Amino acid sequence: MDALVRLLQLLVLLLTLPLHLMALLGCWQPLCKSYFPYLMAVLADKTNRRMESKKRELFSHIKKIKGASGKIALLELGCGTGANFQFYPPGCRVTCLDPNPKFEKFLTKSMAANKHLQYERFVVAPGEDMHELADNSMDVVVCTLVLCSVQSPRKVLQEVRRVLRPGGVLFFLEHVAEPRGSWALMWQQVLEPTWKHIGDGCLLTRETWKDLEKAQFSNVQMERQPPPIKWLPVGPHIMGKAVK
């Protein structure tokens, strides 16, 4: 099967050769950073419609986690367009973090539409380096469809544990690799070298549940969900929470 994967990868590469040449010459990344927020705005609406009940179920637990102030200090990691804001309970003080500054105008629009939240600030930084955020400063961290595209899930989760207060909770919803040995995984492997350029670094074959299990949280609960959009190569999702 490995030989077949390499052959099909080559065919896809030839079909998308201009994209790969632009990436090689350093032209693609700046273009991607500009168009990707618009793509995410469209996909986020579709995903929210399909995943609404699951997101409401997951984020309904946030209201039980209040800090000493009676408010909930919430960090959204890889916040994108702010598609999750509508699911957060009143009383959340939301800090947004994303490495792409082009998302800020979408965040401003989302915050204006969600007056039940208090918007703290937008931090432009990768999840592997959140030095602007203090230790033990967050009650909740939210991470949805982010760990697929970071450079190091292990380092991101280390930073999440650092900024969470003791007893704080990470809520996650991430797409992961299809089962090993399946034809679906083979197609993910075929498409991944091209998909990562289209999806701003998104990797289809990450086994993110392993990173969560190894991240030294005191308790990790997760369940698998089928892909919300069948025609995309994005695989099943894992959804759950991890307690510091």
Image: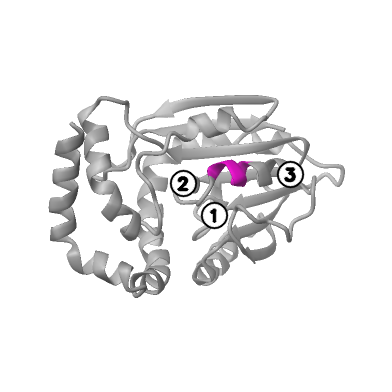
Q: Amino acid at mark 2?
A: Leu
Please name the residue that numbered disc 3 is placed on: 162
Task: Residue at 36%, 56% (x, y): give it.
Answer: 199
User: Which corner quadrant holds the C terminus?
Assistant: top right
Does residue 7 appear left or right of residue 171 in this picture? left
Please name the residue that numbered disc 1 is placed on: 78
The mark nearer the N terminus, 2 or 1, is: 1
Please say if the residues under marks 3 and 1 sit with CB atoms less than 8 Å apart.
Answer: no
Instruction: Find residue 183 and report its horizontal and vertical position in percent.
Output: 20, 30
The answer to if 28 sits in the magenta stretch is no
Task: Say if residue 101 shows up in the picture.
Answer: yes
Q: Nearer the viewer, residue 125 or 140?
A: 125
Instruction: Find residue 213 and report its horizontal and vertical position in percent.
Output: 57, 27
Instruction: Find residue 205 and report its horizontal and vertical position in percent.
Output: 36, 39
Instruction: Find residue 190 and report its horizontal and vertical position in percent.
Output: 22, 44
Residue 164 placement: quadrant: top right
Does residue 203 appear left or right of residue 11 in this picture? right
The mark nearer the N terminus, 3 or 1, is: 1
Task: Residue at 33%, 37% (x, y): give it.
Answer: 235
| Real-space Cα separation, disc 3 to disc 1, in angstroms | 17 Å
Q: Amino acid at mark 1?
A: Gly
Q: Which residue is at the far right?
A: 68
Q: Nearer the viewer, residue 4 or 49?
A: 4
Q: Which residues are magenta?
A: 153-157
Task: Say if residue 230 shows up in the picture.
Answer: no
Please name the residue that numbered disc 2 is placed on: 145
Badge 3 marks a residue whose secondary structure is helix
Q: Main secondary structure of the magenta part?
A: helix
Does residue 193 appear left or right of residue 171 in this picture? left
